[in-house]
Amino acid sequence: MPEPGLLTLPAPAKLNRLLRIIGRRPDGYHELQTLFQFLDHGDTLHLTPRQDGELRLMPALPGVAAEDNLILRAARLLQAETGCRLGAEIRLEKRLPMGGGLGGGSSDAATALLGLDRLWGLGLDLGRLAALGLGLGADVPVFVHGRAAWAEGIGERLTPVELDTPWFVVIHPRVAVSTPAVFGAAQLTRDTPPITMARALQGGASSWRNDCEATVRELYPEVARALDWLSSRAPTMLTGTGACVFARLPSEAEADRLLAEATRHRWQAFLTRGVNHSPLHAVLGR
Ligand SMILES: C[C@@](CO)(OP(=O)(O)O)[C@H](O)COP(=O)(O)OP(=O)(O)OC[C@H]1O[C@@H](n2ccc(N)nc2=O)[C@H](O)[C@@H]1O
Ligand SMILES: Nc1ncnc2c1ncn2[C@@H]1O[C@H](COP(=O)(O)OP(=O)(O)O)[C@@H](O)[C@H]1O
């Protein structure tokens, strides 16, 4: 028997198919140009309403205090913003590595915002939920809108795009990368000339690069080893500030063969496909 009021929702991963750092704002945040695409792989959230207004999250994530968990922060923000007096019981099935550049925390937060909006009958539009989400992290708005996107600013100015949808073999080099450490590194290049979205799309996947790669290679030798191994077999990039690296394959069969080889070499890896529409929005019908 399904639990009454239970809502089970995906929190998909993302890849940065391209990432250019074109400047730094006075507040220290970096101005980016990036292409976000979702994956058909991610975390799952199970939400049930509570009448007493309490928020409970299970299980705890190693190294993350409950109050710092982006799911609880999103839930509290929504309660504060709307005056809603309902609460929720939230169970998180965590599959995405933390600090992996796959946006797991941001995606969990977006799924909590959209899921609780539905559970509590709030009816907020995506623009308002995205504005709330931006206060939790630069990557949250793209997950709220649910469309693959060309992003500018710190990642909040979004234009929906339809990208190619290859199969990917993603390797997690078993190290957590600190996003502030990469953005704070002296050697990071911050002066890549801006380009138009049209030019970026015209260039196609073979022209896309990630400006964080050289710095992440220097700071995290495990990531450099994964990039070297994978790129000798298929076109490969770093996602976000890492740690995950991904190879792009034209067919599932080729991706399967590469995954098998990666596993034999004891890499922690998985196979997935790029999707331009978030599976979260498909489930919610938004
Ligand atoms: C760079 C990206 C690309 O997708 O990478 P990943 O973190 O997913 O690897 C993201 O924009 C990251 O977004 P997110 O992880 O939400 O970052 P936030 O929590 O907002 O910021 C963490 C810290 O990174 C730095 N930061 C982040 C984003 C940005 N455009 N410029 C920055 O300088 C700031 O020092 C900030 O305090
Ligand atoms: N629900 C959550 N899932 C993952 N990380 C979270 C969550 N809540 C807070 N965090 C914190 O956010 C950090 C970045 O997480 P994550 O989004 O997984 O990585 P990235 O931004 O590199 O893709 C984690 O190291 C953790 O400290």
Image (cartoon, rainbow, N blue to C red):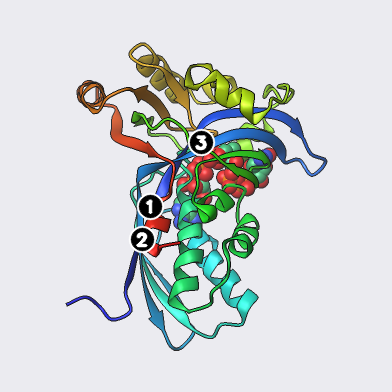
Front of the two marks 1 and 3: 1
What's the amino acid at mark 3? Answer: Val
Q: Quadrant of the N terminus?
A: bottom left
Q: In this rendering, would 156 be left or right of 164?
A: right
**Where 59 falls versus 183 (above or below)?**
below
Which residue is tagged 1? Answer: 279
**Where 217 falls versus 181 (above or below)?**
above
Residue drawn at the location 59% of the way across and 63% of the way down: 129
Task: Please identify the residue farthest to the top as the structure is shown.
Answer: 232
As drawn, the label of residue 177 is 3
Contact? badges 2 and 1 (CB < 8 Å): yes
**Where 47 falls versus 20 (above or below)?**
below
Q: In this rendering, would 5 be left or right of 16?
A: left
Q: Quadrant of residue 257?
A: top left
Front of the two marks 2 and 3: 2
Q: Secondary structure at mark 2?
A: helix
Q: In this rendering, would 224 be left or right of 241?
A: left
N-terminal label among 1 and 3: 3
Which residue is tagged 2? Answer: 283
Q: Quadrant of residue 218?
A: top right
What's the amino acid at mark 2? Answer: Val
Quadrant of the displayed image that contains ligand 1: top right
Front in this rendered view, residue 64 or 109: 109
Q: Is mark 2 within 8 Å of ligand 2?
A: no
Binning the other alpha carbons within 10 Å of mark 3 as few (below 14), some (14 to 19) or many (20 upward) gives: many
Binning the other alpha carbons within 10 Å of mark 1 as few (below 14), some (14 to 19) or many (20 upward) gives: many
Residue drawn at the location 53% of the way across and 38% of the way down: 161
Marks 2 and 3, how far apart in space?
A: 31 Å
Residue drawn at the location 54% of the way across and 21% of the way down: 208
What's the amino acid at mark 1? Answer: Pro
Q: Secondary structure at mark 1?
A: helix
Q: Is mark 3 within 8 Å of ligand 2?
A: yes
